Structures are given as C-alpha cells and as structure tokens.
Amino acid sequence: MQKRRQTLLFRDTAVESLTLSIELYNRPSPIGRNHAVPILLGHGFEMLLKAVIFQIRGTVREPGEDKNSHSLGKCIAIAKDDLEIISADEHALLATVKQDRDMATHDTLEIGEQLFWVRLRSAITLFRRVLKDSLDDDLSVLMPARVLPVSTEPVTDMHALVEDEIRAVLSLLAPNTRKGPEARARIRPLLSLDGAATGRMDPPSEAEVAKAEKLLRAGGDWRRVLPGLATLSFDPVSPETGAQEIVLRVGKAADAIPVRAAKPGEEALAYRRMDPQREFGIQLTQFGAKLGLTRQQGYAIIWKLDLKSDDRAYYAMTSQLGNIQFQGLSARALELAKRAIEGGLVVEDATREFNASQRQARVTTSAAKAQ
C-alpha cells in the first residue's frame, strides 16, 4: 500500500503513544500511572484513526475548517458508521478508551489491576487489527513484541473481575472509612465501561457517580446498578506473536439483565445515552456549508436523501405539544451526502425538485386553510 506522508506521521505518532502507555503501565512507580496510561492510549487511538481517515479521505477536518482536526469521538464515529472498519464490540472498547481519556484529563480515577490490564490488553489487540487491516502494517514490526503490558494476576473471568472491583469499592464505602472520594474514583472507570457497553461515548456525570455510589452502598446488585457490565465477556486469541491477547465482547448472556433506559424509581442509572446535541451537532442551516454548498442546497440534499428518516443521521427532540426543541444531523448524514454527490447526485436538480416540493406544500396548506 502506497501511504501518504501525513498518514505515516499519524501512524508513527500513534505507535509512539501506544508504546509509552505500555511503558508507563509496566513501570515500577505508580506516580501518575492511572492517569497517564489512559491519556496516552486515547492519543494513540486518535492518531491511528486519523491515519486511516487521512489515507482514505485525504483530510481529517470538516469542509471549511482550517483549525481543529477531528476529535477522538468524531474519529470513532467515522470509523464505525462511515468507513465501517470497527465492529460493535470494538466500538464499545473505543468508547471506554475515550471516556477513560476524558476522565483522566479532567477528573480522578482509580482502576483495579486486573481491569486495567484487560482494558489495555484488549486495546492493543484492536490497535494491531486496525493497523493491519486498514494500513497493512504489522505492529510487531513497528513495536517489539516484548513491549506488552504485564499482568501479575492472571485474568480468567470477566464477571469475577467486576465482582472483585465492586468488593474493592464497597470496602472504601464501609462505615467510618471516610474514603468516599477514593470510592468514586474507582467507580468512574466501571461506569465508563458500563456505558460503553450500551454505546455511550461521553464520561459519566458526577450525578451518575453519586447515584451509583448510593445504590452500591445500599447493597444494590451490581448487575442491576451496572447492567452494561453484565453483558461483557472477553475471549483470548492467539496471534502470530504467540503473546496472549484479549478481545472484549458485548453479548447477551443467558442470565444478563436486558439493557434499556431506566424507568423512574428503578434500581439503575437513569442515563445511558450519548448527549444527542453532541452526536447530532450539525445544524440543518449549516449542512450546506459543510458540503461546500449553499444553505438551500443543503436543505435540498437532506430532502432528496430523506435523511430525516435515518435515526443515525437525524435527531429531533420535541415538546409535549409536538414542537421541535432541537434537531440536528450527525457525521453519518454528512458522509451519506458526500457519497451521494460523488456517486452522481446532481445538486442543482435536487435543489429544483426540493424548491418545487416546497411551493406545492405551501399551495396545499393555503388551500386547506381556505376551506
């Protein structure tokens, strides 16, 4: 594969950040370890995905944007929904990577050793696969196989691992311990993994951390408090390097509680969805400009491709009276429009058809009012 120069720069930076995250994980000193590893791991994946996106598209910026390149969240969305280079299981892992990176940057977190190893080791497995499948590069060539996270406590079962984490949290919440901040720091990575299992990308709020603390302190079953964790498992794989690797799975075990939005009063966290104003952050008035077109042409593309019927491309929030309070388009909508135009959609024709439909709608409305 002939790679672009910028692709190589992104790739090399990604491997360097991944290498440093492993080095910090394995070092004897605990200073900064819980925060530095997630930050560097998140940076490594952002650079890797940018390498793939740039190789395919020749840019990692929105049309007309000359300052900020895509964020990690945007890169993950493009990789899953537009380029389709990661699976649903892998998306859950990347969501965890992003949430951990965000929390490590802006808050405090404490990760148990076994859970820490599973997160990092499964991330390396995904990093290796994306690098090979999308850029035709072998991680063992770019980074020595000996550079791997070392676990002194073998991991055998995901649910047993979570139960160990919950016991550690409960010990911090024991009466008269006064270790609430330490307990909340340990709850945060559990919440990020739980949320990622249901597709969430943003870190848990303080209100959610406090609610989880309250439910666990009251003796709530962790499978009900954190049902997303009950769907997780991991499988070992045997790569050519011979080193143990882990693949994180999001499944529906026979005894798992179905994950859905919690109803008022239920013993579960109420919010498990990404903020729609982030995911669907493209205003309809801005859609044309994002495509290098006029506002009216943007409206025409939305109408022509019927993007409002695609719940992954369009979202609207309405009041009880049915009035639209918020509406927006996602990165998927932008990619669908670009593909359509590249595939031969004539913008001028679509705009004429859209304008004609609008005129006809106004005539129909006027006639109805006259009656």
Image: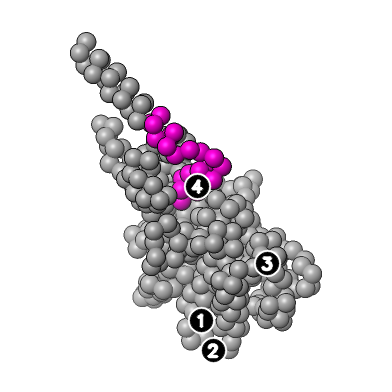
Mark 3 is surrounded, within 10 Å at the Cα level, by few (under 14), some (14 to 19) or many (20 or more) other residues, namely few
Q: Earlier in the sequence, mark 3 or mark 4?
A: 3
Residue 29 drawn above or below residue 86: below
Q: Nearer the viewer, mark 3 or mark 1?
A: 3
For residue 29, the mark is 2
Q: Earlier in the sequence, mark 4 or mark 2?
A: 2
Point out the image quarter for the C terminus: top left
Residue at position x 50%, y 55% in the image: 77
- Main structural element of the magenta stretch: helix, strand or loop? helix
Residue 367, position as x, y percentages in the image: 25, 15
Identify residue type, mark 1. Arg
Residue 328 drawn above or below residue 149: above
Residue receiving disc 1: 33
Residue 172 found in image quarter: bottom left
Identify residue type, mark 4. Lys
Q: Give yes or no for contact between labels 3 and 1 (Cβ–Cβ under 8 Å).
A: no
Q: For residue 131: magenta?
A: no
User: How far, Cα to Cα, is label 4 from label 1?
Assistant: 42 Å
Q: Which residues are magenta?
A: 331-354
Residue receiving disc 3: 2
Residues 249 and 202: in front is: 202
Residue receiving disc 4: 338
- SS at mark 2 in the image: loop
User: How far, Cα to Cα, is label 3 from label 1?
Assistant: 37 Å
Q: For residue 345: magenta?
A: yes
Residue at position x 49%, y 63% in the image: 60
Q: Give yes or no for contact between labels 2 and 1 (Cβ–Cβ under 8 Å).
A: yes
Identify residue type, mark 3. Gln
